[in-house]
Structure formats: structure tokens, C-alpha cells
Amino acid sequence: MALTPNLTRKTLVLARRESSYGTDATPGYVGANSSAMLLWDETNPIQIDTKILDQQVVRASFSKYPDLVGRSLYRLKPKTMLMTTPGGGHSQSDAGWTSGTGDKAGTAAAAGVPPFFGPLLRACAIKETVNSSSSVVYSPVSSNFSSATVYVWADSLKHISTGVYGTATFDGRAGEGIDIMFDMQGNYAEPTQVTLASLGTIQYPLDGKKLVEKESLTISSGYVAPVSHGIQTPVTGPIVRSFKFDLGVNIIERPDMNSPYGLFGLWPTDRKPTLDLVIEVENNLATTSPYFNPWNILTSGSSALQTITFTHGVTAAQRSEFVFSSCQLREVQYADDNGVRTYNLSFNLVSTNDDGDYTLRFY
């Protein structure tokens, strides 16, 4: 029998929220249609992380004894794009699973239905609030965390990781799309051989990615809008090259002598969310409109907190909104973009109200 290679392009990821930490939520409970992720670029989204205990033996030569293999866990880094496209079976509330209209992969965006990557987003210390037939809102939490079970088929090898927690980064550039890079960790289990063919027909979420355009990004103070710009639709506001929103969730390991591989699981312990913007530097600093003076905002500290908002997607049923209500500018750097001077602005996302750091709303 000839040896058959394992192909990187044939990689499937399923995810589902766990009802209790570390309990296999069995993604694909109604077949693979119900939990399939729509992913890009990262053809190896799962890796094993094993501690090798390199202990030096004292003997009459330099010969080495075998190492002790320590704790093992999975690291998962699936990459997708920001879409409002729903995934089947993902609207799991604390009361249980629902299966209403639009709650299946392959359907168009529907107001009040979570996106297909919802289970992974919730595993980043985020809560999901579903407003029926209206919107789905994601905001940070400091307790009552939701973990996820993630299945990864590396061609014919099936990996199961329970108790998955992590963080994520949203990265968008003008004229491109918004990438979401998840950085997750979960419990380890030995892979098994289960062919993709055994799953039957896999129906993925619809491709609903949108161009980064007409985002209407605004900075609440310190910025005086320039005259209308934009060829097709005149808009006002800064000329923005890109943004990067980092959830900044810290995940720790929980070592345990009584657990397999010496690891009970993982847990979120802190978050330090940040927002980075790249905008053009305008000639006028503080004399006549238009101008933007980040230096004054920086040195004013907490007395000059900014509200920064923008909307992705111009179609009502395919729109998502970012709201950062208390942004403290922590760094200003000059940069160059093809001969045009730009500001690299870095903000800490702070809040005087508990868990009021940011909100992400899908319509």
C-alpha cells in the first residue's frame, strides 16, 4: 500500500461553546454543517506545546539520558475575517441551544444571529448578548467565562481540544479586509484517525467579508475634521490608513498533579486591550482648521480620554460597529508612508465602569 501524504489545504476547524469548562461540547452535533469555521491563510491552525524537561545527568561521560516529557497542551491560531455571516448552532445561550431561523451555516446574515466565530470570541473572556431580530453585542467580562471545544481535522487526523480560552486581534487596512487572528490554548488529547469523508457534505458559512471603506471613524476631541474628502461619497474625518484592536486577554495554566499531563486547564486572569491607529499628519497643527494635535492629547493624560468609533460594512444587514468609549493615548510616533508623514497612535482602552472597555455590535 502506497504512503499517502497529509495535505495542509485540507484542514477543517469546528468550534462550539462548552456548557461547563473542559466538557467536550461535540462541535458538529448536527453534522459538520453546524460548527464549521470559515478560515483563511493559516493552514496549520493547531500545534502541540509540550514541555521537555532537560535534566543534566552526572555520569562519567557527556552522554545524555532521555528527557522527561512534561505537560502538554494545544495552541490554536485560526485566522478568519470579520463577517456577520451566521454559523449553525452557535446561538447558545446560558439556557441552552437554539435552532431558529438563520441558525444554520450557509445562510445569509440575519439580524440578531451570532457570527460563525462567536464561540471563539466568547472564549476570549467576552459575553454575548443577543437582541432578537436586532443585533448581537460582544463586550468584555471579568467572570462567568465561556470556554470552547475545538475540533481540528488535519486531513485525516482529528484533534480534539477542550477547555479552550484565548485572545484575539482585529487588524484592518484601508482597501482590504479586517482579519481576526485568534490565539487560543486548550487541553491536549492524542489525535485519532478520522477521515474528512466520514463527515459527509460540509456546508460552510457564507463568505461575507467586506472591504474596509466608508468606516466613518471618528475621534471625539482634539481633532477638527478636514473638509469633505472621498471621491464617490464625500466624508469627513481623519485620513486613516489602518487600525489594530488587540483584546489583550492573559491566559494562565493551572498545573494539577491529579490531571492528565499534569494540567487541570487554563483560565483568563487579566486583560489589557489596546487600539492602534495610523493616520495622516496634516500640515496645520493647532492654528486653523483642519488640524489634529495628538501631542496635546498625550500630555493631557486622563483628562483627555477619547471616544473612537467606526462602522464596518455599508449594508444594514451586514454591518458591525466598534465602540471604544474611553481611549487614553499612550504613544505617538511619526512614520513614513510613501513620502507622506503619518502618526502611529497607540491607545489603552480604559473604563471607569467595570467591563466597559469596548463593545462590538453585529447587525
Image: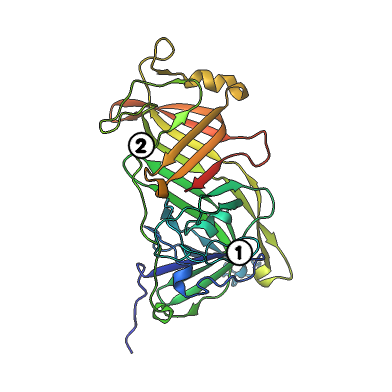
Question: Residue 70 location in percent, x, y?
Answer: 63, 67
CA neighbours of label 1 inside 10 A, class few (<14), some (14 to 19), many (20+)? few
Query: For the point 57% across and 22% down, which residue is it?
Result: 304
Number of numbered discs present?
Answer: 2
- Helix, strand or loop at label 1? It is loop
What residue occupies the far top of the structure in this picture? 287
Kindly tell me whether residue 196 is visible in this rendering.
Answer: yes
Q: Which of marks 1 and 2 is nearer the N terminus?
A: 1
Give the distance between the C-alpha atoms of the residues marked 1 and 2, in whole angstroms.
55 Å
- Helix, strand or loop at label 2? It is loop
Question: Residue 352 location in percent, x, y?
Answer: 67, 33
Q: Is residue 268 above or below residue 223?
A: below
Residue labelled with disc 2: 214
Q: Is residue 151 above or below residue 177?
A: below
Kindly tell me whether residue 51 is visible in this rendering.
Answer: no
Residue labelled with disc 1: 54
